[in-house]
Image (cartoon, grey):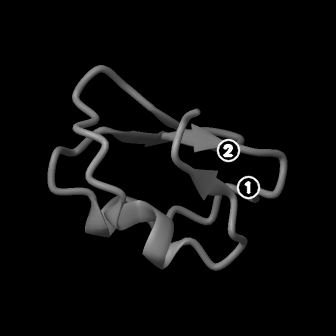
Amino acid sequence: MKVNGNCVGCGQCVAYCPSDAIIVLACASMNEKCTQCGKCIDYCPMVAISEEA
């Protein structure tokens, strides 16, 4: 998963990550636990998360 500049660090995506792979500081980032399931994409209100190309 890739986080773009729209991320405001709200953390809403964290609760929906089954792998506990999202870290939110100033904005969200994914760690090595990310399984690319895409659930975080559906719950990001800022449309800041997308699949990596």
From the top left corner, tell me how far across and down residue 46 is, in percent. Answer: 72, 72
- Crowding around mark 2 (Cα neighbors within 10 Å: few <14, some 14 to 19, many 20+) is some
Inspect this view and state whether residue 12 appears. Answer: no
The image's mark for residue 52 is none
Of the numbered discs 2 and 1, the one sitting upstream in the chain is: 1
Q: Which residue is the site of mark 2?
A: 27
Q: Identity of the amino acid at label 1?
A: Cys
Inspect this view and state whether residue 44 appears. Answer: yes
Q: Is residue 31 above or below residue 27?
A: above
Q: Is residue 1 left or right of residue 6?
A: left
Look at 30% across and 67% down and name the residue there: 15
From the top left corner, tell me how far across and down residue 33 is, in percent. Answer: 22, 28
From the top left corner, tell me how far across and down residue 21 is, in percent. Answer: 29, 38
Element under label 1?
loop
| Cβ atoms at labels 2 and 1 below 8 Å apart | yes
The image's mark for residue 7 is 1
Look at 45% across and 75% down and name the residue there: 42
Q: Is residue 45 above or below residue 2?
A: below
